[in-house]
Amino acid sequence: MTRVALTLVSLVAVASAQRQRLCANNPTAEKILAHELHFKSVLDKLQVDADAFVAKLPAEADPAVIPVYFHVIASSNSSEDGNIPDDQVAAQIDVLNQDYSEAGLTFELANTTRTFSEEWFTGVGPELDLQAEMKSALRQGDANALNVYTVSFANPDSEGLLGYSTFPSDFESNPSDDGVVILYQSLPGGNAAPFDEGRTLTHETGHWVGLYHTFQGGCSGAGDQVSDTPAERQPGSGCQAADTCPSNAGVDPIHNFMDYTDDSCMNQFTPGQVTRMKQQMKAYRGVVF
């Protein structure tokens, strides 16, 4: 079976003037179509009915445990230079578990590494050689392991980013690239307000488990491939209620973790998103619920 990889990394940027997350790259409709066709073929091969997958799971099923390898990249021993303390890492894991508690996923910190490299701390960004170098040196675990890297995004090509992630379908073709890279100041207690409550990792992990942005595709088409997330013409901002697709059912899902609203505004995944992430995790990461 020919594998079609979705090679996109999700990029989120902070525009301080607007205090808004901005997407630097989105998959094209053609890439999404190719990916979804491949995804369906994988589900068919696994004899999984995409519409009834979760319904077949035992109601009392235990959460799937995801090991987390947290890679702190810093330019010195100082927390101001990226050396995040252990209690801040623990607080971030707590936020992940809170946000995914209804999704059947539990995140357990398996290991924390600390690397002092000004070059990596300031220079790492999506599609750059330094990123590949860093990940190849540090990544741990199998397809089911979440690797998180914290950096400063000080490179001119990456400045302003909050984070980016690979998708589950990318793992087979490039295992060492798998994982999430986030701004170190976005962890709980950081100074990237209003993105300082840990929801950047929640959002990027959403991509890591196979979700698109809620505004993917705007008001037309299949959007984020999840039927119960209302269509949204453009990313949300702050926590401002809106209905940017008035001809479609529902209002903009500003409280969804896969929108771009402030951390304090985000608090939910939909049942359809939970279904999709479980399908993706089973199909591409071998996670059994």
Image (cartoon, rainbow, N blue to C red):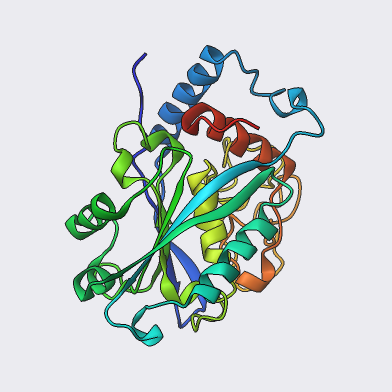
Q: In which quarter of the image is the C terminus?
A: top right
Q: Quadrant of residue 154?
A: bottom left
Is residue 206 or residue 111 the one in the foreground?
Answer: 111
Left or right of 53? Residue 279 is left
Is residue 129 or residue 4 the one in the foreground?
Answer: 129
Q: Which residue is drawn at 22% across and 76% down?
A: 118
| x then y, percent, for residue 87 | 55, 75
Q: Residue at x 56, y 68 (%)?
A: 90
Q: In which quarter of the image is residue 124?
A: bottom left
| x then y, percent, for residue 168 | 45, 38
Left or right of 182? Residue 103 is right
Left or right of 274? Residue 114 is left
Left or right of 32? Residue 158 is left
Is residue 182 or residue 24 the one in the foreground?
Answer: 182
Q: Can residue 77 be seen in this view?
A: yes
| x then y, percent, for residue 14 | 44, 73
Q: How many marks?
A: 0
